[in-house]
Amino acid sequence: MDSVASEKSIIALDGWLQTPAGLYVRAWEQQCLDSLTVDIFGFNAVQIGLPQLDALAASRMPSKWLLDARLPSRPPQESRLTLVSAFDELPFDSQSLDLVVLPHVLEFAAEPHQVLREVERVLIPEGRVIVCGFNPASLWGMRQGIGRVTGRHYLPQAGELISMPRMKDWLKLLNMGVSQSHFGCYAPACKTEKWLRRNAFMDKAGARWWPYLGAVYIVQAIKRVKGMRLIGPAWTKKPATAPAGAPVTNKRREQQDG
């Protein structure tokens, strides 16, 4: 997907997020992100894209930014400073961020691998990245696949929906190990609030009986650095005692006695 198509898809996502299905997704993701980010400690956190969602609302880090590819159409929230930049060339020093959140960015990016490489570059060792995505192995993903044939898309016309296993492989290639993963939004692909509410019972049932078939997922990974080891307390070491001698048979004396 080229940059022009990527821009059109992002604009389409903005409108879709205001629909009943979009509000349904935003509510679940906000709740899940709040529970994840509140326990991640550090100094600098960045949310890339999707300004309609405050992914860092519960974060207790002192410095929080929202990075968007376009100028905001409305005043940003007070809890975060808005920056405008391309997602594949992040305006941050290497190893300077403790947390990066990517809500539905990679699906609409012209070069998703380059975006992830940039995230890996700016994260400190043991820094965290959180990725939100639409699950192609779901009722919504199935309907989206049918829409590619009929021309009636349910989700925004994205370049590609990325499955959870594939996302984990991408992260693994960049030495980022997945620590947590969550699925949500199990209701069928309904367009009206009325039918979404009628199928609300499927959220509890889906989480129990078919947990990997939620319409959206959230993955948290940690940047690992080879050769790095955590420094623990300096324990007091006892001086080594002199090695005790072991008795050895004197073979020469035994031969003389014989």
Image (cartoon, rainbow, N blue to C red):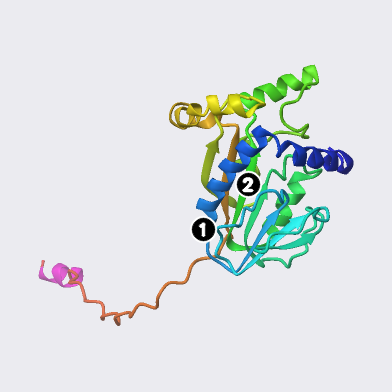
Nearer the observer: mark 2 or 1; the answer is 1
Q: Tell me which corner region of the image, top left, top right, bottom left or bottom right, holds residue 21.
A: top right
Q: Which segment did they paint magenta?
A: 250-257
Q: Is residue 173 visible?
A: yes
Q: Residues within 10 Å of mark 2 (few under 14, many from 20)?
A: some
The residue singled out by tag 1 in the image is 38
For the point 21% across and 76% down, which residue is it? 245
Q: Is residue 169 visible?
A: no
Instruction: Give above or below for 18 relative to 194.
Output: below
The residue singled out by tag 2 in the image is 131
Please give left or right for residue 257 compared with residue 93 in the image. Answer: left
Q: Which residue type carries mark 1?
A: Val
- Residue 208 screen position, x and y as percent: 43, 30
The question of residue 256 being in magenta is answered with: yes
* Main secondary structure along the magenta-highlighted residues: helix
- Residue 219 screen position, x and y as percent: 57, 45
- Residue 88 screen position, x and y as percent: 79, 53
Please give left or right for residue 2 compared with residue 164 in the image. Answer: right
Q: Residue furthest left?
A: 257
Q: Look at the image and tell me in which quarter the N terminus lies.
A: top right
